[in-house]
Image (tube, helix red, strand yellow):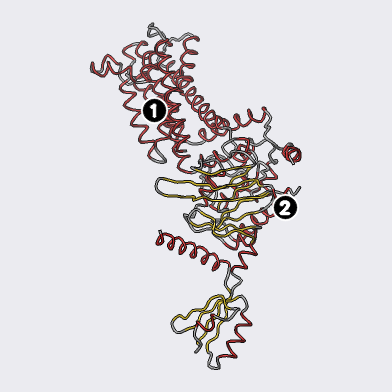
Amino acid sequence: MDTLLTLDASPDSVAMPLGRVLGAYLAEARSECLRYLRAPGFMLPITLFPGMFYLVFGVLMAKGEGADASRYLLASYATFGVMSPGLFGFGVSLAMERDGGLLTLKRALPMPPGAYLFGKMLMAMAAAGFVVLLLLALSQLARVALSPGQACALFAIGVLGVLPFCALGMFVGTLIKGQGAPGMLNLIYLPMSFLSGLWFPLPMLPKVLQQVAPLWPSFHLDRLALAAVGMRQDALLPHVLVLLGFTVGFLLLAARRLRRFG
Amino acid sequence: MDMSAMPVAQLRGAVKRYGALTALDGLDLLLRRGELLALLGPNGAGKTTAIGLLLGLHRADAGQVELCGRDPQQLAARRHIGVMLQNATLPPTLRVRELLRLTASYYPYPRVLQESAELAGVGDLLDRPCGKLSGGQQRRVQFALALCGRPRLLFLDEPTVGMDIEARQSLWAAIRRLVGEGCSVLLTTHYLEEAEALADRVCVMARGRTIHEGTVDELRARVAMKRIRCLSTLAPQVVGGWPEVAEARSENGRLHLTTAEAEVVVLRLLQTDAYLRELEVQRAGLAEAFTELTRDAAEASAVQREAA
């Protein structure tokens, strides 16, 4: 009986060729990207707001203050722009898919669990990269002189810097189901941007707020972005470590909640 | 060896509680290779929870859960199954073709896209975004997603809700075809005619337990009883003593009998009671049987509670 069982199981048993497993990851990433590129409700706000703010405050209004103001604000608005694909791309879609039953279906299907997160992550990174490129293009209107190295560094920081916000968005997405998520995320996104000095430079904020600024991940990302465009020379490693810790922490919290409550 | 006797999925004494609510109370369920088992029961009977355990969506609090001989939470176990859940909002901006291709990518040996589409009758919908489909079309697309991985075992949770008669018939035909190819199916449904049309075996659930399990014919046999009603001078105690009469009672002055052999009983009634009037004979349907079964279970548990 045992031999018969194995014989019977062999043609379509467990083994999934590695190529097909990779294929599943790619297919998931591809369809996540397609979904969101086709959803104007997602792409418009995440590109319009940072683009418009930078155009108004960083390009048009900063004319009198010279290229340095434009340069400073390029880093800040890039940080601001990078946060939203992470928070909203991850958080809102997770909350919606938990609510609509799509996540349940996907969990019942043999989807590699990593593929779901990988797909969303790649989508958020692509969107973040797009926002940074848009801001870099706008910065040329204000004649911000950037070396190719600086531009690449800012781009890389944008693409990787979206990850802590993916983790935070994912955690919020596991807390809230459905339509409540965008509101909740805005309550995190906007105050955090303000408190990290993304709208007004930190020295213009009250002392207390300046002191608590290092609590926010966006503060650390902004420091890295400022360094990338040549506005700061402080040590980068602490900021990288804080962001890394933040990412891992929220990822674990979110994964735990997903496993427990689905 | 009889391959058809091998279980592809089973629950043994499965218990699942949600807080104070016991959704499954020691449920046993066995699905054999190549058979279609219909899971019936009123809302809240635990059908969806049972399926959730078999799909690895939840963990049982007690008892055993096996899918293709493995823990359903293992990916390898689920590579043999296809799933159609009651409510899953498909991603609105993805086209049907893209969603089918994505779902097929999860499986080692999926069907080619065209074949899945034709089996489920969605060949003409492939380039439509999912958000623009009608309810019935969405169900058909979900069916296509369920079968695209060439599954050995299909879970169909209320598959024909929201479908018109024609779509339902063609879905039934597709299900029969898959079963013919050796696929096992676990079907939950509210439509008894659906179970009647498709199922090899039927399992009726109430309050997290199985209250009846058997072939469709056995379930029908349980209800092959006929009902006789008449105005008679005979006392129910007397008629109840006749060997062919399963049950006799008097209601509003009318005699109500339940019997498997209506002809014999009617003949005897007419012979014994010259004043018999308003004779009616009715066949009990599957639906009636089902209601009766679940009501019996409810009464039994009420009696148990009183006794306790």
Residues A154 and A20: in front is A20
B231, above or below B18, in the image: below
| Number of marks in picture | 2
Q: Residues within 10 Å of mark 1 (few under 14, many from 20)?
A: some
Q: Secondary structure at mark 1?
A: helix
Residue found at x 35% / y 22%: A56
Q: Amino acid at mark 1?
A: Phe
In this view of the protein, can residue A74 be seen by the observer?
no
A83, above or below B84, in the image: above
Residue found at x 37% / y 18%: A76
Residue placed under numbered mark 2 in the picture: B180
A106, above or below A214, in the image: below
Q: Nearer the viewer, mark 2 or mark 1?
A: 2
On residue B1, the disc is none
Q: Secondary structure at mark 2?
A: helix
Residues B184 and B258: in front is B258
**Are tags 2 and 1 found on a single chain?**
no
Residue placed under numbered mark 1 in the picture: A49
Rendered location of residue B9, percent (x, y): 62, 46
* Chain assignment, label 1: A
Q: Amino acid at mark 2?
A: Gly
Rendered location of residue A156, percent (x, y): 49, 16
What is the quadrant of residue B76 in the picture?
top right
* Chain assignment, label 2: B
